[in-house]
């Protein structure tokens, strides 16, 4: 983009009259439109937010070194980003510029506006296919479906990013297009993420849209919109897409900064009145469609385990459920620290098989019973043998649910191991042995095709969890 080119093309010039951090007020350019891009003489780019009687309010999108009196030219264009299949494996900024060595896109390049109207109900379908995260406790207790929008919420340092990396690894290894939007992240965090996906060999399926914490507020604000536009591009090719927005509480803070600088009337917690609209318009662009799907995992940070924060409850209201990572469980050593009682999936169960739905129902009831028993134990009550057995089984199930970071477990083998635990085959072994046996079985499932076929056959032939347990008991009896 060249200042002189646009000055000659449109023939209108303006001058900066006032600067307020990332907001500047421009006089002149009489025919400028809201949302139009303008270019400053020094090479910076801005987007018109609103028009006053004498001045246009402009949000600066690039690192600013502007001064009062700097010339401004209209471009006559709205903000668009370049899109191509060659984006796969690349890292881009919210302006669509590729970061790193390869600076250009190959093949057919299409430009799309980043703020579009979500698709209507005619082009959408019910969530009807399961979405595997590779995290057993999520896949069996709060399962997801393709096209679902599921909030990931938890305090700082409770393993949200580690959980998201497991999901990303599981989906990228299946060839699903994955988009990770790093919103206002530190450069060290971005580098660690890129090194991780390169080390796992899954970078060819991932597009990273990044904005650093030191970037202009306008650039950070655009990050999730650019990421969602990239997701829609691949969805329109009939592909299933996973998009992670990490995180929207930071996005809301920077949007609040922009609107306060722009002298908008503040609402609750000084957020602007349209903050719900800003995020819900973004969330509505995800879903299951006639052609392809976009599964969206937005992230929100809670404070001291409080789920009732303004932005947090807003995003809960516009998504199809939430997974809560509990700081207390994290401190107890649970990984991932998913709280099964405070996590919700509204549409995920309908996309699961009858076996998983039955397992989910029984497992949820069992964990509720287990928690109630543990609360009674605090009073020093004497426990019967059946209660002791329940407590032992619960401890072993929670031990199995403990999953190392950067490891994924296929759903079928997770169901099988739970069936083995439920059948009583491992009643005589300790918790440490349960972990070792589980890891051995998972390793055999991944490496031994005949064992994998045997497990998959048992799972497919079981209409209910009870039938599965009976099949495992018979197989154990034959093995003995």
Image: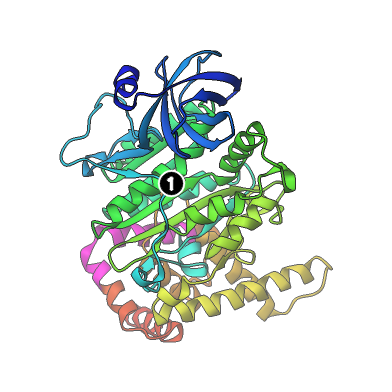
Magenta stretch encompasses residue 437: yes
Looking at the image, which residue is at 56% across and 14% down? Answer: 68
Q: Which secondary structure, mark 1?
A: helix
Q: Quadrant of residue 342?
A: bottom right
- Left or right relative to 164: residue 342: right
Image quadrant where one finds the N terminus: top left
Among all residues in the image, which is located at the extreme left?
107
Image quadrant where one finds the C terminus: bottom left
Find residue 406 and report its horizontal and vertical position in percent: 42, 46
- Left or right relative to 89: residue 431: right
User: Magenta residues, as a range?
Assistant: 434-453
Q: Which residue is mark 1?
A: 165
Q: Nearer the viewer, residue 163 or 443?
A: 163
Q: Quadrant of residue 409?
A: bottom left
Q: Nearer the viewer, residue 472 or 171?
A: 171
Among all residues in the image, which is located at the extreme right?
379
Looking at the image, which residue is at 50% across and 14% down? Answer: 65
Find residue 438 and report its horizontal and vertical position in percent: 43, 61
């Amino acid at each position: 983009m060249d200042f002189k080119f646009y000055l000659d093309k449109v023939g209108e010039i303006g001058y900066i009259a006032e600067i307020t951090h990332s907001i500047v007020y421009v006089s002149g350019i009489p025919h400028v439109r809201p949302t139009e891009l303008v270019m400053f003489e020094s090479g910076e780019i801005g987007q018109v937010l609103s028009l006053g009687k004498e001045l246009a309010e402009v949000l600066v999108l690039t690192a600013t070194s502007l001064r009062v009196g700097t010339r401004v030219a209209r471009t006559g264009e709205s903000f668009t980003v370049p899109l191509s299949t060659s984006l796969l494996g690349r890292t881009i900024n919210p302006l669509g510029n590729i970061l790193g060595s390869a600076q250009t896109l190959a093949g057919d390049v299409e430009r799309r506006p980043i703020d579009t109207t979500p698709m209507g109900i005619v082009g959408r379908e019910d969530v009807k296919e399961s979405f595997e995260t590779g995290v057993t406790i999520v896949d069996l207790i709060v399962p997801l479906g393709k096209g679902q929008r599921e909030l990931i919420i938890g305090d700082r340092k409770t393993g949200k990013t580690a959980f998201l990396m497991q999901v990303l690894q599981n989906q990228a290894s299946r060839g699903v297009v994955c988009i990770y939007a790093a919103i206002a992240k530190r450069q060290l965090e971005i580098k660690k993420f890129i090194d991780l996906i390169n080390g796992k060999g899954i970078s060819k399926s991932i597009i990273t849209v990044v904005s650093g914490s030191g970037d202009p507020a306008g650039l950070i604000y655009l990050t999730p919109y650019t990421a969602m536009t990239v997701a829609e591009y691949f969805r329109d090719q009939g592909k299933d897409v996973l998009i992670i927005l990490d995180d929207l509480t930071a996005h809301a803070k920077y949007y609040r900064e922009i609107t306060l600088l722009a002298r908008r009337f503040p609402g609750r917690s000084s957020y602007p009145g349209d903050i719900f609209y800003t995020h819900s318009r973004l969330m509505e662009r995800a879903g299951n469609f006639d052609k392809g799907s976009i599964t969206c995992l937005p992230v929100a940070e809670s404070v001291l385990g409080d789920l009732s924060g303004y932005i947090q409850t807003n995003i809960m209201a516009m998504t199809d459920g939430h997974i809560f990572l509990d700081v207390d469980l994290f401190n107890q050593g649970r990984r991932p620290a998913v709280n099964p009682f405070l996590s919700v999936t509204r549409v995920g169960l309908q996309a699961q098989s009858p076996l998983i739905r039955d397992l989910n129902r029984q497992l949820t009831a069992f964990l509720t019973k287990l928690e109630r028993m543990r609360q009674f134990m605090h009073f020093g009550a004497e426990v019967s043998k059946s209660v002791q057995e329940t407590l032992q089984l619960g401890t072993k199930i929670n031990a199995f649910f403990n999953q190392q970071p950067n490891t994924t477990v296929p759903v079928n083998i997770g169901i099988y191991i739970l069936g083995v635990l439920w059948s009583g085959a491992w009643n005589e072994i300790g918790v440490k042995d349960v972990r070792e046996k589980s890891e051995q079985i998972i390793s055999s499932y991944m490496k031994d095709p005949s064992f994998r076929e045997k497990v998959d056959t048992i799972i497919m032939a079981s209409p209910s969890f009870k039938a599965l347990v009976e099949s495992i008991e018979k197989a154990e009896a034959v093995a003995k």
